[in-house]
Amino acid sequence: MNWQGWAEIALTLGLAVAIGWPLGVYMSRVWNGERTWLDPVMRPVERFFYAACGVDAKKNQTWWSYAGALLAFNLFGFLFVYAVLRLQGVLPLNPQGFPGLSEHLSFNTAISFVTNTNWQSYGGETTMSTLSQMLVLTTQNFVSAATGATVAAALARAFTANRGEGVGNFWADLVRTTLYVLLPISFVVAVLLVALGLPQTLSAGVIAHTMEGAEQKISLYAVASQEAIKMLGINGGGVFNVNSAHPFENPTPLTNLITAISINVLGWAAFFAFGRSVLAKKDVRALVLAAAVLLFAGAATIYATETMTPPAQQAAGVETAVNMEGKEVRFGAPATAAWAAATTGASNGSVNGMHSSLMPLGGGMAMFLMHLGEILPGGIGSGIAVMVVMAILSVFVAGLMVGRTPEYLGKKIEAREVQLSILAVLAIPVATLGFSAIAAVLPEALKGLMHSGPHGMSEILYAYTSATANNGSAFAGLTANAPWWDATLGVAMALGRFLPIVAILAMAGSLVAKPKLAPSAGTLPTHGGLFVGLLVGVILILGGLQFFPALALGPIVEHFQVLAVTDGH
Amino acid sequence: MTTIESPMGNGAGEGRRKAGALAGGLSPAIMTRAAKDAFVKLDPRKLTGNPVIFATWIVALLSTVSAVAAVASHQSAGFAIQIAGWLWATVLFANLAESVAEGRGKAAADSLRATRVTTNAKLITDEATGAVTPTPAHKLVPGSLILIEAGDVVPTDGEIVEGMASVNEAAITGESAPVIRESGGDRSAVTGGTTVVSDWIKVRVTAQPGSTFLDRMIAMVEGADRRKTPNEIALAVLLAGLTLIFLIAVVTLLGLGKFSGVNLDPIVLGALFITLIPTTIGGLLSAVGIAGMDRLMKHNVLATSGRAVEAAGDVDTLLLDKTGTITFGNRMATEVIAAPGVRPEAALRAAISASLADETPEGRSIVELGRNQGIVIEAPQNATSIAFSATTRQSGLDANGMSWRKGAVDAVYRSLALDPKMVPAEVTAAVDRIARSGGTPLAVSENGVLVGVIHLKDVVKPNVKERFADLRRMGLRTVMITGDNPVTAAAIASEAGVDDFLAEATPEDKLRLIREEQGKGRLVAMCGDGANDAPALAQADVGVAMQTGAQAAREAGNMVDLDSDPTKVIEIVEVGKQMLITRGALTTFSIANDVAKYFAIIPAMFVVSLPALGALNVMKLHSPQSAILSAVIFNALVIVALIPLALKGVKYRAIGAGKLLSRNLMVYGLGGLVAPFAGIKLIDLIVSTLGWA
């Protein structure tokens, strides 16, 4: 540990918040249908989409109509991706000549990209054609991210309305977020990345002749464009197998900084956008602060564990205090720690180092940040939406202590909101722990593990955590392209995505109809340090504590086992 | 300026406590019955409404089965028996909390039942002759006409159609001084169970047999049809959700543990599950609600539902009648301003003399004002009192060639043939000042000469200003309702420190104001007693009807104040808040407890197979078994320890939401985090010393 390391972590995480703020103001304008400077270019395109699809974008949909549109759109996306992947071998733009994907891999991958998870049971450069990468995967990178944003936009309207009816129009939110936010910002970042050396080509790759005279095939894709939306859309599915550790995805410390910031920037922007749309900037700043404190604590834990010498190494007289296994030398421990926290705190899932090689507590922290529900800051929109759920639970538990039935942002929190909040946070423990417990005793599943014992436990837990939380990062070690893993991880991803979304939209439907109350001196203040502390406590105790027994059997026991080894042999 | 002793006591202070039917503490008899009830409630059908305790019941049963199986197969079963025993104790303690809370209400209901009439009522069978037929009370139907004479117990509820009587209502209100009930107006209702002490009345029965006020009162205090309140339901949902999440966390350990080579005893898993689920609040939740109703009863207020009590905590706007709530109700003399050239004492003496024959409250208050300043004037012999009339608009006294008059300023001027322009400027200024401040100026003359001005004002009760400031800090707006003109209303409103006022208010205005406030998403509380208040009482979220009030009002409100004290609405709001605060505090405490329980049980569960996890045993508990047993025992005992808090309620302080939250978070959040570490450690010491585990 050194101050440069801490500064790098603080800068990486802090810049994302700082840039997210103005972008959030812009995003809010897009959600609210206000004028933006892109209107002259994008309005005609937007209108064209509505006309082409026969959509009445002005119709204020009820929550179930909104949720129905969202589910239908995603179902269509799933079928389309599945079909293209299965038929890859006969489709054009396949210079690599890859065959179609297996049923279970197509199923898993289609769900994965539709749910914004981007779990990859495959290695990109040995599986995916250029067409598949560009047509279905990159497209889903955009629209799955926009889908998440629509949830926050609808929830914002629910909090703004006074005895309202509809929560907005799904198609308008989807199209506008994609056209006005994701596309232009991705374009700028992609151009920047090309300038910094990322490949952007339709060719399959080049053949290199090594000094030993062997031939080496170096795969190429339109990397920069996919890289930009992979980060900004909080998708995380890399073109190449090793993701952002690959020199074509992330060649230099500068691209590392830019892409690391890109992981969180729109997640934070959605927080600020929500605050502006609901006219509750102060309250949302408290949410940002709580998330930032937890995220920084996570990064700090990882950085600390990666740079503290275990007793056994000390006994063996190892000089370096940094665990460099699985890390890129060009990035080092701080950049890897910041990235690991950022990617698991958001539901991104890209990696610039191997999480399996982190020290036990570092890997455990990466898992724990996902257990918290992907709210630090999580996916675009989906993060703030679940964070609001946590705030509602906090307000409900603690708000009673000021002697009123609780309210949040001017809306009374009653049985239905509590019920739906619980439903929204239930998916992660159910799918993560449920599937893990089954996989842990199923020989069919255990074949995919690389390790037994605590590290094997971590491999299982990490996989289901990552899938359910729609993160998509891999612990490495697990060979997941097998029917059991592909199928169950697919189900976990779908559960983890759509259960909270439907619950939150249903909650929006309940909230929108309620009167908007003016705060009084008797209202629990939901800004300020006290509330931040309360929220952090509730996130840790209600959101994280139930994973403590499982984590005890994985990273925690492994940590103490490492500490227990005191001689150097 | 003269201070006025309150003749009516400090109405804005603590509610007057009476030895009413509803008062009474927790007697040993109540406790014995509660202990018995705790066992009766072990019937699982009675527990289905409480998922947390129901889950505990099931796990207790499973552990018992497993303990019995261990005994049958001659394995060591001491640990299993102890765990099962403490799990049953957890359920029993939760039941005990509820039955203790119910106990006082049941006792009060029993004593109310005793007042039901068993003797025959006098049914008037022939209205022309007034002939009566003895008829049992339960045969009286609405519309029947009955005669009630001195010494009779009123057999059922009704309206007086003829006559007037003094009625002792102690059976209902606890107030033993009789009250006058007469036909016509808002004092015509009589209540079954009360006693006519003098005279006679003819009463038209208004209540169906079995649904009299007394019957409803019995049902309310007994909590017979106690339904869960909205907030209680929401909290129950949260607790059920947490129970489900922890069930998943514990059940999945079967698979995860097998992978890790850990052999998990089902009894231990059951113990972990029970300690993690929020048994503390789950066990105390219904007790808190019942105790809230109970606290209202101690204030002599009956709520028709727990929902009303809960709504009271949420009230944003309080509509308060000026008269009787904010002011004493009668205008009183507060000063006498002497005209130029007249000694102040002389002016005061003249004012008193003019009032000696005046028996109105205003007149008496002038005599009272003099007495407070040490001036007592006896009425002279052969004095002639000049009564007030609508034409002269003044009154006074003539005696021994002297004459004193007091009255409306312009009327006195006219009778003195004074041109208002000729009146000394000091007097005019005083008159204007009094009028502007909302008071009423009276001119006083002695022997045809203007000597001064009396300041009559509506006196605001002491302490109300502080009380309203407290309410404001808790986010409540107070609105004063009065029939006065806007000038007078504004003056009193500013003196009393209310946030707003409604002047020249009619019952329709009141109703409109309530609807307006509700339209802005605010909850409104009000109290009223007249029949014309009934629509507003029904519209308000919390409508407190006065027991002395009209029947229609009592039926429209969702609370009845047996003391008929309109300031009580403030206490009602506080009781509502206190109930919510208690619920929140216990929930927070319960959830915060989990951290320590993890640190007790997780290392104990795994340490045999994974010795490295012994590092998590931060409390250095004696052995895995003692650790688990201690956590279970702590979990059971904490319910008993918190029963008094659940019944008494967390103290409510009017310090604003932010401060209240930080204070309660410190005590119940942080306390809930720390207390079990100490408690479990202590129990572990005892358990290991006694050799239980």
Image (tube, coloured by chain):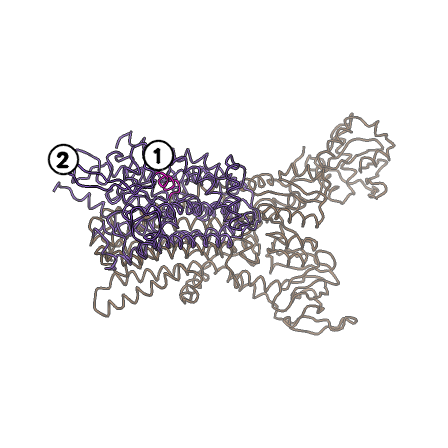
- SS at mark 2 in the image: loop
Tell me the subunit letter for badge 1.
Answer: A
Q: Residue furthest right?
A: B417
- Determine whether A568 is above or below A444 in the image: above
Q: Which mark is residue A278?
A: none
Q: Colour of chain B?
A: brown
Q: Position of residue B591 (x, y in %)?
A: 38, 50
Q: Residues within 10 Å of mark 1 (few under 14, many from 20)?
A: some
Check disc 1 and give the amino acid type.
Val
On screen, B599 above or below B449?
Answer: below
Give the label, 2 or 1, closer to the camera.
1
Chain coloured purple in the rendered structure: A
Residue A431 visible to an observer of this rendering? no
Circle 2 chain: A
On the image, the x and y values in percent for residue B305 come to 55, 58
Quadrant containing the N terminus of chain B is top right
Give the CA separation, mark 2 to mark 1: 44 Å
Residue B280, located in which quarter of the rendered image?
bottom left
Tell how many labels.
2
The percent position of residue A96, horizontal first and vertical second, equals: 29, 47
Q: Which residues are magenta?
A: A224-234
Provide the residue designation for mark 1: A194
User: Are dots 2 and 1 on a single chain?
Assistant: yes
Q: Which residue is mark 2?
A: A317
